[in-house]
Image (cartoon, rainbow, N blue to C red):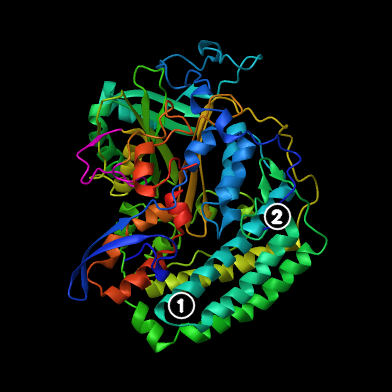
Amino acid sequence: MADEPKETKPPQVPTGEKPASSTPPVSTPLAKPVDASTPAAPAAKPAAPTPPKPPVVLQTPLDNEFVTRLRAKFGGALLEATEDRKQAILTAERARLVEIALHLRDEEKFDMLASLTAVDWPKREKRFDVVLDLYSFAKNERLRLKVWAADAEEVPSVVSVWPAANWQEREVFDMFGIIFSGHPNLKRILLPDEWQGYPLRKDYDILQQDTAWVRENLGIESGQ
Amino acid sequence: MGPQHPSTHGVLRVKLKLDGERVIGSECIIGYLHRGVEKIAENRTYQQFAPYVDRMDYVAAVSSGLGYCEAVEKLLIVEAPPRARVIRTILTELQRIASHLLWLGTHALDIGALTPLFYCFREREEILKIFEKYCGARLTTHAFRIGGLQYEAYDTFEKDVERFCKDFESRIVEYETLLTQNRIWIGRTKGVGILTAADAIAFGVTGPVLRASGVKWDIRKAMPYAAYDQYKFEIPVGTTGDTYDRYLVRMEEMRQSRLICLQAIENIPSGPILAKVGKVLKPPPGEVYHAIEAPKGEIGYYIVSDGTVQPYRVHIRPPSFINLQAFDRMVRGHLVADVVAIIGTIDIVLGEVDR
């Protein structure tokens, strides 16, 4: 394989020198509940600590007919509706996820679950975002649906709504340790069943591994 | 079956529950190639991570790279210049043909037809040569950069693409002569691994597998990216959603990709190839989900930025992983020999399934 010149790039940071936890978890743009009734006010956002110039705020409250319809139906269960780079993002109450998912699938025609994943914000009270990206063939539109979950809180499984969630929820369980209640077969999918720890959590260092498992199954001291 | 079975295209292990020769249940055991690319992404800068995506679907690295670059561009709110977009489109379509050729060759080999493999690799070699001339690499190309391209197209680029496209028309006829009316081929693929449109959508299946089930949906048309809105092409669809339909859909897709390439080389706009993005990329805080039509289906990137040089989170939605979920539905009731045909017809790459 021929190597390409990479002169325009900064030198590679050796893997070990930058543990995951050193990435400053800046307050998430969606972490603070945005009052949808106030108009888009860039000053209302807390400034991110890193850049010296005022940060560009691209998250604005979303208030269209679709959101109004959902608010009328679900009221307070729809916690947030924002728009980020022209993408609609809804945050729903965790306990009513399946009900809202069914409504979105059947009434709003979001018939495909494109992607299901999670994001870890360890400094937040509810540290996990579970993120569902939906697609509607009829409308040719995407919609992102989120729920928040604290460390030990279970998230209702949406496998009954979109079977596509099956492996993706297993992957999220595998990588973040989030329990999906009502999942038909919640076990690890990419990592070995006996593996200890959840690698995509922010407090799991990039060099960290289940050394006991590696020693026992691979017969070596370290997988590196 | 597996993980070292030659027909599993990598290290896929399938637990089959059999009643005699008939499959009554299955379970896919995956993860043998898991490298934790999503974790790596959080510890690399945006540019440093770009070559890693080539190593997921290593037979369609150009497509994976395009999806990633466009996702970061969306996060940065920049657009690649027109010239870069057209060259990207040409290379991505060539990659689609190369990926489908590899699929066709190995799928036919699995079913027992040895010859197509040699024919397919002959043409695939021509495409890889174009990639090599363009960027120096054949498989893990890292052909694009965030904001456009690093390399200008080489002098005879248009001529090479044109020559390939002119030749390729008769080559597809050769493959079809070998297979389309072949009684054994029809016997082994017709009615095998049927996936209905409703099931395909429920399982989130995308790409040629979805289209063979009769759903006329292609991200290149539905949500055009790169330069696809400028070209005319058809979306082939199947009717029954069986292995034979998926074969026909992919054959037609190669023809359409060829037409896109021919249209694109006619008029490559002049101008810069890289947008002004700067050397240090700090996307404004926020998140994007961007998906493109890779040869195997929808490859999506969900990237969260916290305003630093490293992504806060990158999630990759790999088409192979999601499409493989439908395997159990497709395989039930079939014979063990058909399992091989069905694994082949989904067109998975384990590097992408396991990431």
Which residue occupies 50% across, 64% down?
B235
Among the 4 quarters of the image, the one containing residue B188 = bottom left
Magenta segment: A178-194
**Mark 2, other Cα within 10 Å: few <14 / some 14–19 / many ≥20:** many
Of helix, strand and loop, which one carries label 1? helix
The residue pinned by badge 2 equals B87
Q: Residue B178 carries which label?
A: none
Among the 4 quarters of the image, the one containing residue A155 = top left
Is the same chain shared between marks 2 and 1?
yes
The amino acid at mark 1 is Leu
The amino acid at mark 2 is Ile
**Mark 1, other Cα within 10 Å: few <14 / some 14–19 / many ≥20:** some
**Main secondary structure along the magenta-highlighted residues:** loop
Q: Mark 2 lies on which chain?
A: B
Q: Which of marks 2 and 1 is nearer the N terminus?
A: 2
The residue pinned by badge 1 equals B109
Which residue occupies 71% across, 49% down?
B84
- Residue B219: image x %, image y %? 50, 52
